[in-house]
């Protein structure tokens, strides 16, 4: 009897195929949200990070269709080919409105350099819809610099007649050990003449992030230190000292 039932079922299925009466499973509906771009900008202090975390503001641009429930937008953060954060919130929408701006809490441990938001997707009613044509999403995070001398100064200048002594001390906020000496890097000692800053000497910082430079000059100038930026450090310059 079971064999006959199976045979009958097979015959009905075959007949249905021939007659075209079998209905294929319905295709999944498309995403109710079409994400077009994501913009990520630092919320303060530019790209410099000087703590374990730093907030970046995101703005997601998207076309939102008709919704009967809640839809979330997510993405992953990469530095190069390495994923450093998964399922980062990029906004949401529902039948009563939407919110497409907010903050990404970046971590110092992610490293330094250029980052990219990728794998943007919409989760709606248990389904995940990936958007492969989202533009933007790039942002940078670099080590902040600070003074390593007494009272947090970067530069100290002492004058003894014509003899002048310039002491420089710089530290950076690293991804692994917080503040560390900016060891082995070159910085510029500059002076201001006729309203223009000119480089007096390019010096290399020692392992402790400090260096001392001495010279003789009968003229009095304002001095400052310029730290060139790099792909991982923001760089910067100090305010000028009093004329010495």
Image: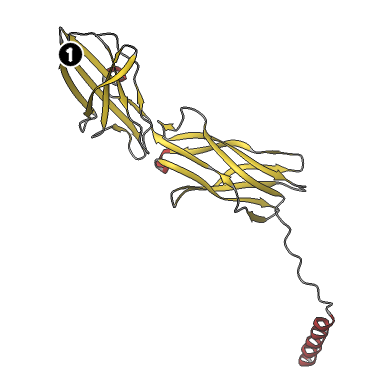
Q: Quadrant of residue 141?
A: top left
Tell which residue pokes out farthest to the top in this image: 161
**Colour option used:** secondary structure
Q: Which residue is mark 1?
A: 164
Q: Is residue 5 left or right of residue 224?
A: right
Assess disc 1: are there few (<14), some (14-19) or many (≥20) residues with their C-alpha within 10 Å of its C-alpha: some
For the point 79% across and 92% down, the residue is: 4
Count up the numbered dots: 1
In the displayed structure, 225 sits above or below 174; it is: above
Residue 234 at x, y percent in the picture: 38, 31
Tell which residue pokes out farthest to the front in this image: 194
Q: Which residue is more in the foreground, 175 or 114? A: 114
Residue 66 at x, y percent in the picture: 77, 47
In the displayed structure, 162 sits above or below 126; it is: above
Residue 61 at x, y percent in the picture: 64, 41
In the displayed structure, 237 sits above or below 192; it is: below
Q: Is residue 35 left or right of residue 192?
A: right
For the point 71% across and 56% down, the residue is: 30
Residue 44 at x, y percent in the picture: 49, 28
Q: Which residue is more in the foreground, 197 or 85? A: 197
Q: Quadrant of residue 199?
A: top left
For the point 59% across and 42% down, the residue is: 38
SS at mark 1?
Answer: strand
Q: Quadrant of the N terminus?
A: bottom right
Q: Is residue 207 left or right of residue 42?
A: left
Q: Which residue is more in the foreground, 56 or 36? A: 36
Q: Quadrant of residue 228?
A: top left
Q: Quadrant of the C terminus?
A: top left
């Amino acid at each position: 009897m079971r064999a006959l039932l199976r045979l009958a079922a097979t015959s009905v299925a075959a007949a249905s195929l021939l007659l075209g009466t079998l209905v294929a499973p319905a295709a999944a509906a498309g995403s109710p949200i079409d994400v077009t771009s994501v913009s990520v900008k630092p919320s303060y202090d530019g790209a410099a990070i000087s703590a374990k975390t730093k907030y970046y503001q995101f703005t997601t641009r998207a076309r939102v269709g008709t919704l009967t429930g809640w839809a979330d937008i997510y993405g992953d953060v990469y530095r190069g080919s390495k994923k450093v954060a998964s399922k980062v919130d990029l906004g949401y929408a529902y039948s009563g409105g939407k919110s497409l701006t907010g903050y990404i809490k970046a971590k110092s441990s992610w490293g330094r350099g250029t980052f990219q938001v990728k794998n943007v997707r919409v989760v709606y009613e248990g389904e995940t819809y990936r958007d492969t044509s989202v533009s933007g999403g790039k942002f940078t995070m670099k080590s902040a610099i600070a003074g390593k001398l007494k009272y947090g100064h970067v530069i100290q200048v002492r004058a003894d007649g014509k003899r002048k002594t310039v002491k420089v001390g710089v530290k950076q906020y690293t991804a692994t050990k917080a503040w560390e000496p900016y060891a082995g890097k070159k910085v510029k000692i500059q002076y201001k003449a006729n309203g223009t800053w000119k480089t007096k000497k390019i010096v290399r910082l020692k392992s402790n992030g400090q260096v001392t430079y001495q010279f003789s000059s009968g003229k009095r100038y304002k001095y400052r230190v310029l730290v060139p930026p790099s792909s991982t450090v923001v760089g910067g310059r100090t305010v000028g000292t009093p004329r010495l």
